[in-house]
Each structure stands twice: as C-alpha cells, then as structure tokens.
Image (spheres, helix red, strand yellow):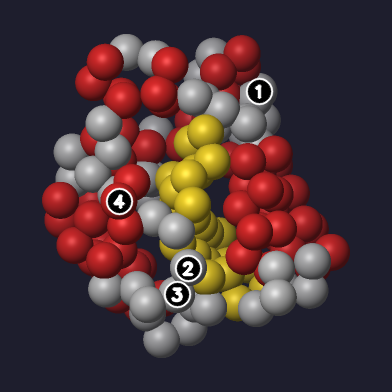
Amino acid sequence: MRVAVLNGVNLDLLERRDPALYGGVSLAELHSRVTAWAVELGCTARCRQTNSEGEYVNWCHEELDWAEGIVVNPGAWSHYSYAIRDALELFSVPLVEVHLSNVDQRESWRRHSVIADIATKRILGRGPDGYRDALEFLAQP
C-alpha cells in the first residue's frame, strides 16, 4: 500500500514545541519513524511537510493518483482551512486525520476540525505513535 503522509504548518519546528503535547521529536525523526513503520507493515510512505497552504493543496492534488491511503496532520489548518478540506475531499481512498496532541481537550478553537467529517478515522493525542496507529489502520486487509 502506498501512503501519503502530509504534515502542515509549524510541524517543521516540532522539536521546539512543548514535548508533553507534541512528543519531543524532530520532524526528521518523525518522518524516519513513519518510513520505518511503513516498511514493517508492508507499505511505502511518502512524507512531506510545508508551511504553505497552497503547496499543501498542490500535494493533495499530486497524491490523488499515487496514494492508496493518506495520513494528514494539517496542524492549525485543520481548524479553519476549507481549501485544504476541499482538496482532501477529492480522495476516494481512506484518510486518517492525526494530531500529536489531543486537540479535543485543548483550547476551544482547536476542538473544531473542518476535515473530521471526511476522515475515515481520527487519531488524537498519541504523540508520534499516532502515525503508527494510522499506518496500522490503513494496512489492515
């Protein structure tokens, strides 16, 4: 299975964010773990991160013909970007929304996700292991 892993805004500085909320790993380490977990599960993962909303949307378009499953963590865009929602809505493959922290137990503005209703599954508050959970979900026969 080919899995696109699309990370959004501010995740490039993951290691500088509160380790209690975000897991204390760098983006490079997270992507390395995701790639290794994918191999263990018989998948191929393509990991990307951007702080540009337009680039994120373009990547969604590019992945439409490649990905057989998608893991998304748009970061703060999850709470308000209908442009990203529209791009993700085009996928006909399973889509897993992942957040390192439990956004449903944080500030009120973080509790709303514009992509929750199009996600096949949501994984919140599991830190980096949430990505493994997402891959395991997608790899199920």
Q: CA distance from mark 3 to mark 2?
A: 4 Å
Which of the two marks, 3 or 1, is nearer to us in this view?
Answer: 3
Mark 2 highlights which residue? Answer: 94
| Disc nearer the start of the sequence (2/4) | 2
| Disc nearer the start of the sequence (3/1) | 1
Quadrant of res 85: bottom left
Judge the density around disc 3: few (<14), some (14-19), many (≥20) Cα neighbours within 10 Å.
Answer: some
Label number found at residue 117: 4
126 left or right of 17 in image: right
Q: CA distance from mark 3 to mark 1?
A: 31 Å
Q: CA distance from mark 2 to mark 4?
A: 12 Å
Mark 1 highlights which residue? Answer: 24
Q: Position of residue 65 (x, y in %)?
A: 41, 86
Q: Residue at x 49, y 77 (%)?
A: 67
122 left or right of 52 in image: right
Q: As shown in the figure, which amino acid type bears the numbered disc 3?
A: Val
11 left or right of 130 in image: left
- Tell me, yes or no, whether the two marked residues, 3 and 1, touch with CB atoms within 8 Å: no
Q: Residue at x 84, y 64 (%)?
A: 40
Tell me, yes or no, if residue 16 can be seen here. Answer: no
Mark 3 highlights which residue? Answer: 93
Q: CA distance from mark 4 to mark 3?
A: 14 Å
Q: CA distance from mark 2 to mark 1?
A: 28 Å
